[in-house]
């Protein structure tokens, strides 16, 4: 978001909430998962990055309740009182959830007024919800005089979404948003929560995110069914090879030993998780070595696995992936996010981006009848306070 747009939203804050102390400004990025899909809740490896786009939050402490919340995407003001932190079925449930999580184990934020804005597409697999949650967590804690660590902010945001909002997500999104480092990707072991920052050693190569125009939502997709299938596959595997904490800890040899005992569908699900986690490890090495050709090939293999083994792609994702691979300068492309719509992520030579953006929209529109949208980004930094000395 440009400085001019930030100032416009600052003026909007004053118009809707009145003059007074200058609001504090906080930012939390969105997340692009380069590779490692559906491995997070299975205890495997993931390799996300924080994109340069995200959620901006203007916030100002006030003396009493109710809190007033405004989103630039929604014209209706939301009121929140401390005794009514219960789901209401609107966008502010994510805010209520974070406040609830903070009060249970970290701090007691005072009342505040807040304006949320940003440049992340919703329901596109770019973690707009985690971005909003983490921005809320660090801002609300700051108002309470508490500075959260990246791990604490991620944990509060994850509890908010999984326990309060009711989306049984892994913790990858919140960790990526809270712990990212500029010009790096985050190699995260979702079982141990250990992580390393991997330098983005691909000079001249951009990350392009293409939205299919198909919105996706975890609550309305077979996402929960996939989780149950993985749990059942793990139960059967453990009966053959011994106890394993999660699918991400199962080796390819152990899966082969258990394969005769697994129904075909469960074997496909388990194969994706086990092989995808290995692809993530190889992708991290390719990044460190600056080997964009190998990395691009791993992205392509990931998409094929998600399409054929895990079965979470859709015709639009497949079309945009195939069209992208046919363009000059594209090293690799795959669906990113939970699937069933949303986005693809591609590695593309920076010089080839203009030609891609000129040709691909019409090719995709012809193939699907839908209008795509595109974001070009590079690995950005973690959630943080940006500027302003007000009560935020």
Image (tube, rainbow, N blue to C red):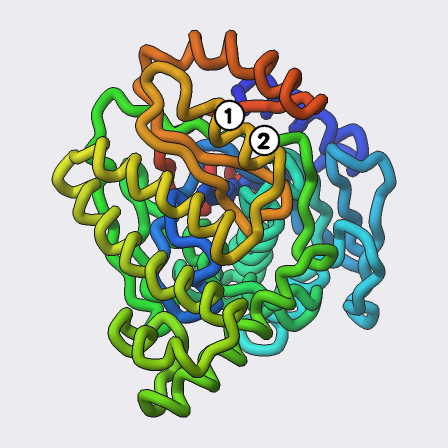
Relative horizontal placement of residue 128, taking residue 65 as reference (left or right): left
Res. 354 in view:
yes
The answer to whether mark 1 and mark 2 are in CB contact below 8 A is yes
- For marks 1 and 2, the one nearer the N-term is 2
What whole-number distance in Å separates the C-alpha atoms at marks 1 and 2?
Answer: 8 Å
Taking the view exactly as shown, the residue that stands out farthest to the right is 76
Residue closest to the eye, 250 or 140: 250
Residue at x 65% of width, y 72% of height: 163
Q: Which mark is residue 375?
A: 1
The vertical placement of 271 against 59, above or below, is below
Residue at x 36% of width, y 44% of height: 301
Q: Which mark is residue 272?
A: none
Res. 139 in view:
no
Depth check, mark 1 against mark 2: the one in front is: 2
Relative horizontal placement of residue 29, taking residue 44 as reference (left or right): right
Label 2 Cα neighbours within 10 Å, binned few <14 / some 14-19 / many ≥20: many
Location of residue 236 in the rendering, given as x and y in whole percent from the top left corner: 46, 85
């Amino acid at each position: 978001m440009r400085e001019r747009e930030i100032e416009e939203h600052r003026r909007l804050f004053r118009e809707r909430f009145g003059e007074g102390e200058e609001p504090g400004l906080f930012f939390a990025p969105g997340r692009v998962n380069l590779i490692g899909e559906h491995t997070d809740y299975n205890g495997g490896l993931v390799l996300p990055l924080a994109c340069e786009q995200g959620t901006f939050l203007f916030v100002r402490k006030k003396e009493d309740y109710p809190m007033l919340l405004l989103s630039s995407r929604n014209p209706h003001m939301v009121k929140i009182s401390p005794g009514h932190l219960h789901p209401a079925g609107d966008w502010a449930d994510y805010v209520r959830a974070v406040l609830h999580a903070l009060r249970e184990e970290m701090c007691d934020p005072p009342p505040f007024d807040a304006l949320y804005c940003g440049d992340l597409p919703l329901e596109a697999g770019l973690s707009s919800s985690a971005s909003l949650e983490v921005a809320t967590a660090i801002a609300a804690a700051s108002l309470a005089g508490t500075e959260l660590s990246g791990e604490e902010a991620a944990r509060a945001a994850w509890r908010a979404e999984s326990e309060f909002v009711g989306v049984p997500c892994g913790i990858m999104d919140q960790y990526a948003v809270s712990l990212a480092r500029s010009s790096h990707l985050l190699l995260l072991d979702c079982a141990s929560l250990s992580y390393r920052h991997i330098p983005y050693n691909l000079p001249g190569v951009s990350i392009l995110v293409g939205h299919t125009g198909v919105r996706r939502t975890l609550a309305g997709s077979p996402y929960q069914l996939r989780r149950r299938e993985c749990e059942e596959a793990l139960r059967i595997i453990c009966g053959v090879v011994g106890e394993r904490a999660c699918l991400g800890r199962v080796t390819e040899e152990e899966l082969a030993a258990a394969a005769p005992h697994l129904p075909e569908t469960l074997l496909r699900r388990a194969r994706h998780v086990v092989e995808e986690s290995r692809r993530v490890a190889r992708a991290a090495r390719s990044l460190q070595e600056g080997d964009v050709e190998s990395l691009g090939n791993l992205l392509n293999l990931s998409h094929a696995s998600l399409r054929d083994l895990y079965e979470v792609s859709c015709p639009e994702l497949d079309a945009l992936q195939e069209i992208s691979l046919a363009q000059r300068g594209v090293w690799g492309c795959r669906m990113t996010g939970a699937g069933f719509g949303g986005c693809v992520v591609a590695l593309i030579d920076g010089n080839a981006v203009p030609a891609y953006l000129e040709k691909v929209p019409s090719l995709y529109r012809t193939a699907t009848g839908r209008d795509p949208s595109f974001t070009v980004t590079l690995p950005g930094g973690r959630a943080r306070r940006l500027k302003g000395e007000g009560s935020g």
